[in-house]
Amino acid sequence: MGDFHELNVWEKSKELVICLYKLTNDGGFKKDFALREQIRRAAVSIPSNIAEGDELGSNKQSIKFFYIAKGSTAEVLTQAIIAHEIGYLTKDQFLHIYKECQAISGMLTGLIKARIG
């Protein structure tokens, strides 16, 4: 515990945030302030909660924040589905986000199981 920046899931989720910030600077997102800000906040929540959870003193506390990060991953995926269906994301952009969210969620599940012991 305490070296969150060395966790692969933190790095992967941070990269997803950067990707989403870049994608939401263009196209329909540029005019849709509400969806743009919501997907950005949800995305930032993922690595932030991983970091916060990893810095806490007990596995029980850490797990709570890892579950929050997992929930934020589902939120990002839901918003990406909507963005794709209304034409803000191309199929390739959506598939990239989908795959990253699935990977991050799976990695969080593994981290939670490891911390449960």
Image (spheres, helix red, strand yellow):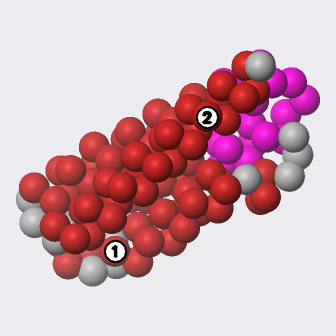
**Crowding at label 2, few (<14), some or many (≥20) Cα neighbours within 10 Å?**
few
Give me the residue at 44% from left, 43% from top. Answer: 73
**Considering only vertical position in the picture, is 112 above or below 54?**
above
Q: Secondary structure at mark 2?
A: helix
* Relative to 14, 40 lies left or right: left
State the image quarter where residue 99 is shown.
bottom left
Residue 90 falls in image quadrant: bottom left
Q: In the image, residue 54 lies at what x, y percent?
A: 79, 40
For mark 1, what is the residue?
A: 23
Q: Which residues are magenta?
A: 47-66
Near-viewer residue (45 or 34): 45
**Rendered image: mark on residue 110:** 2
Give the side of residue 19 with respect to residue 9, left or right.
Answer: left
Disc 1 vs disc 2: Cβ atoms closer than 8 Å?
Answer: no
User: Which is more foreground, mark 1 or mark 2?
Assistant: 2
Pick the residue in front: 53 or 117: 117
x, y percentage for residue 47? 62, 52
- Vertical side of 16 occupied by 66: above or below: above
Q: Quadrant of the N terminus?
A: top right
